[in-house]
Image: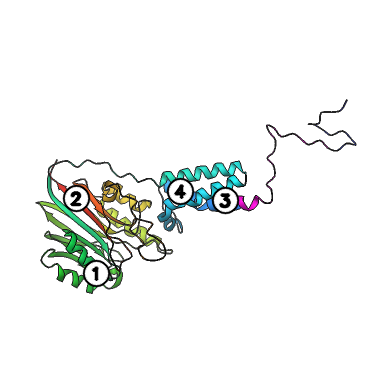
Amino acid sequence: MDSDPVLAAVPGRAPVPRPAGTGAAPPPLRPRHRPAAWLAGLLLLVPATVTVCRLLDTDGVTPVPQLLSFLPWLALPAGLGLLLAAVARRRGLALTAVVVLAATAWSSLPYTTWTVVSHGPPLARVRVLAANVEFGQATDALIATVRRERPGLVYVSECDRACRRALTTAFAGELPHHASVEAEGSAGSVLLSAHPLRDWRMIPATMGMPGATAEIAGRSVRVQLAHPMPPLPGQVDVWRRELGRIEDFAAPRTGPTLIAGDFNASQDHAAFRAILREGRLRDAAWAAGKSRAATWPVEGPLPPYVQIDHVLVSDEFSVEDVRFPDLAGSDHRAVLADLDLRGER
């Protein structure tokens, strides 16, 4: 009697192939599938690494801080990796791709800040405008926007001496109060106010971050311009340190607070979320359902893909609306927020 073909082949006969079944080894990767499998793995590497850092609430090291700005867009290579894994017929790789794609999509949902309901009667409507004028190049466009929108607080980043002079002259009547850091290029900044300012201060940073206390409807409101260094390769520590100083300013909850400007960080950066968490602040764009509205870069070959310009508010403010006006001459969109300052609870 012949032996079982599953266990052995009869001498003198050609070997009987082992039938596929439970416990059978997977078929070898066909040569034409190998490029698809390798490419799928490469496409999944970046989304997987960046998403893990996002889920672990860390910004990591270069290039992770830079790539976090692209987080929602990383679903594209993750999806393509899944497609290639299916073409290569590698079930394990395809399952990995599904997990990476799902995690990337979940991480890209609008972030959660402190859920706070503002109580008390509305005391005053406060319109806030935050704008980066790119070395003063968009000064004229900003002047036109301020005249059209009539904000009561204007936070201006990258405002050189000529820009500061033009703004304070143009709005000497409407916005007579100001705190500024006078410097050339990107280091200059100015905060213009229709409300009296006192207690001028500055957060130490490479670029100017002036602040003060505004008197609005009988309440003292801390107002602070934010403009930390961007997370350039080789300067991530500076970026993290300057965002940390903004976090330190926000942490003491001592009444109404408004922090606005070009944060050079998005909702996907842990260092930015720490400012919200420690200061119990809300991003006005998030409160208005617009946390993924991109503000940068407006110039260049790529369309705007990330929101790095923000207006952050304490729970003494309710958010009525947020818009993002274009400024000719700048690589940023401005942020225009309509807020209501509330009375004591």
Residue 14, how many percent across, how many down?
A: 86, 38
Q: What residue lies at 68% left-to-right and 33% top-to-bottom?
A: 23
Callout 1 touching callout 2 (CB < 8 Å): no
Rounded to the nearest whole Å, what is the CA distance between mark 1 and mark 3? 47 Å
Give the CA separation, mark 2 to mark 4: 33 Å
Residue 51 tag number:
4
Q: Which mark is residue 139?
A: 1
* N-term mark: 3 or 2: 3
The tag earlier along the polypeptide, 1 or 3, is: 3
First in residue order: circle 2 vs circle 4 = 4
**Residue, x 37% and y 56% (percent of image)?**
306
Which quadrant: the N terminus? top right
Asked whether disc 1 touches disc 3, contact meaning CB atoms under 8 Å apart, the reply is: no
4 vs 1, front mark: 1
Amino acid type indicated by mark 1: Thr
- The residues bearing labels 3 and 2 have C-alpha atoms spaced at a distance of 47 Å
Nearer the N terminus, badge 1 or badge 2?
1
**Depth check, front residue: 113 or 255:** 113
Q: What residue type is labelled 2?
A: Leu
Secondary structure at numbered mark 1 = helix
Q: The magenta stretch spans which residues? A: 15-37
Residue drawn where x is 28% and y is 43% of the image = 114
